[in-house]
Amino acid sequence: MFRRTFWFTAGAAAGVWATTKVNRKLKQLTPESLAAQAADKAVEAGHRLKDFALDVKAGMAQREAELGEALGLDAHNDPELPVQRRIAALDYTQHSYNRNEDH
């Protein structure tokens, strides 16, 4: 008698456990849940891309400063405007290029 009761209880518990697992999985596979998961992944990827871009920008600024020191260029220009530093580093007075000279 106890053996039958034990197996009945074990079967009922396994059935409840399996039903709960299946219902959770079905809720995860609804279109709303899949859309929310995709949106979360997209936001996470956006944050990672932003962090990567900031790391690249910081590395570029550091390397440019190292090169500027190595070449003896003065860094009196605004650090937010890297184009100005590059133009200041180039001497346009010595080399003027006229693309019509070749024709």
Image (spheres, rainbow, N blue to C red):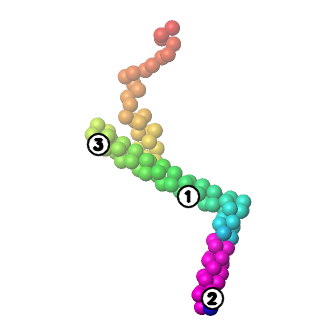
In the rendered view, tell whether residue 14 sits above or below residue 97: below
Q: Which amino acid type is shown beneath numbered disc 1?
A: Glu
Task: Confirm or deny contact between disc 2 and disc 3 (CB under 8 A).
Answer: no
- Nearest the camera: 80 or 92? 80
Q: CA distance from mark 2 to mark 3?
A: 84 Å
Q: Which residue is mark 1?
A: 44
- Nearest the camera: 57 or 7? 7
* Residue 34 placement, left or right of 92: right
* Residue 84 placement, left or right of 4: left
Q: Which residue is mark 2?
A: 5
N-terminal-most mark, 2 or 3 = 2
Q: Which residue is mark 3?
A: 69
Q: Report the mark closest to the observer, 1 or 3.
A: 1
As helix, strand or loop, the secondary structure at mark 2 comes to: helix
Q: Quadrant of residue 95?
A: top left
Q: Decide: few, some or many residues near mark 3? Use Cα within 10 Å; few <14, some 14-19, many ≥20.
A: few
